[in-house]
Amino acid sequence: MLLPAKAEVARQLRRYRAWERAMLAAPADRAVRATFEDAGYTLCVLMGKRCAREAADAAERYLCITPAAYLREQDERASVRAAARQGPSRSRRWRFLAGR
């Protein structure tokens, strides 16, 4: 997996946080909201996340640790999510279906 340059991550995270503050100060301003959403989208693409909050959290973690440690952390999280998606084992499913 390719990782972005830490300087670029830091720059985009600062940009996202600045627009977040501006949006919280003026929530009715559509231009500020649009720019905030653009900053969030950029951070999502940069960090490979679906949600701007997740991307900001990932960027902060990435900036605090080594790239190798960040990749290990992401691999561990992915394996936990995959195990949770698989559901019950086959033997449990068959017992459930047989009990009907």
Image: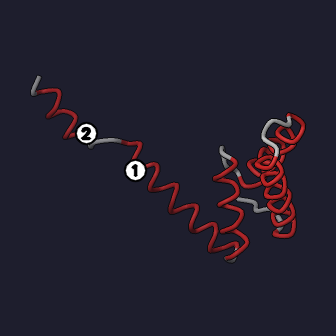
Q: Residue at x 47, y 56 (%)?
A: 79
The answer to which of marks 1 and 2 sits earlier in the sequence is 1
Badge 1 element: helix
* Most foreground residue, 60 or 100: 60
Location of residue 6 with respect to 85 vertically, above or below: below
How dense is the environment of label 2, judged by Cα within 10 Å: few (below 14), some, or many (20 and up)?
A: few
Q: Residue at x 70, y 48 (%)?
A: 52
* Most foreground residue, 65 or 26: 26
Residue 26's quadrant in the figure?
Answer: top right
Left-right relation of 78 to 35: left
Residue 89: x and y in percent read: 26, 43
Residue 27: which numbered mark, if any?
A: none
Residue 83: which numbered mark, if any?
A: 1
Residue corresponding to mark 2:
90
* Most foreground residue, 65 or 98: 65
Location of residue 17 with respect to 7 vertically, above or below: above
Quarter the N terminus occupies: bottom right
Residue 62: x and y in percent read: 69, 68
State how far apart marks 1 and 2 are (Cα). 14 Å
Badge 2 element: helix
Left-right relation of 86 to 94: right
For the residues carrying marks 1 and 2, which lies nearer the camera in this image?
A: 1
The amino acid marked with disc number 2 is Arg
Quarter the C terminus occupies: top left
Q: Residue at x 19, y 40 (%)?
A: 92
The amino acid marked with disc number 1 is Ala
Residue 55: x and y in percent read: 69, 54
**Number of numbered labels in the structure image:** 2
Residue 69's quadrant in the figure?
Answer: bottom right
Residue reaching furthest to the right: 31
